[in-house]
Amino acid sequence: MKNPFTAHPHQVGESYIKHFGFAAKTGLKLILWGGVALIHGVFPFLFTAYVSIRIKELYRQITERN
């Protein structure tokens, strides 16, 4: 039986630790950016392009990994 903790990371060519690190870092960034987006929603003159720029950068990083 395949190990459920390593099957997917190995499918994408990563170790469990490397995959966990990227996923955790990405998740924390998304939480932070969500907070920034909420602030922007209340104060539209703040962070006018911050989140969209970061999401585009994240998309580039993810597509370059695969």
Image (cartoon, rainbow, N blue to C red):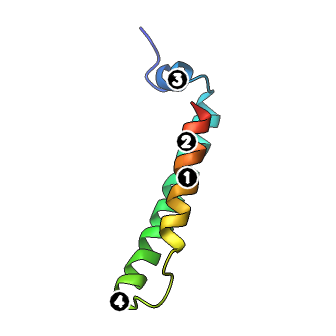
Residue denoted by label 4: 42
Q: In x, y percent, where is residue 59?
A: 52, 48
Q: Residue at x 50, y 59 (%)?
A: 55
Q: Earlier in the sequence, mark 2 or mark 3?
A: 3
In which quadrant will I find the C terminus?
Answer: top right
Disc number at residue 6?
A: 3
Q: Residue at the far top: name it.
A: 1
Is 57 drawn above or below residue 65 in the view shown? below
Callout 4: SS: helix
Q: Nearer the viewer, residue 5 or 21?
A: 21
Report which residue position mark 1 lands on.
Answer: 58
Depth check, mark 4 against mark 3: the one in front is 4
Could you tell me how far apart the alpha carbons at marks 1 and 2 are, in whole angstroms? 6 Å
Residue at 56% x, 20% y: name it. Answer: 10
Spatial CA span between label 2 and label 3? 19 Å
What x and y, as percent, mark residue 27? 49, 54
Residue designated by label 2: 62
**Dot 4: within a 10 Å radius of its alpha carbon, few (fewer than 14), some, or many (20 or more) residues?**
few
Nearer-N-terminus badge (4/1): 4
x 41%, y 8%: residue: 1
Q: Amino acid at mark 2?
A: Ile
Could you tell whether 27 is left or right of 42 in the image?
Answer: right
Tell me the distance, in whole angstroms, between the alpha carbons under discs 4 and 1.
24 Å
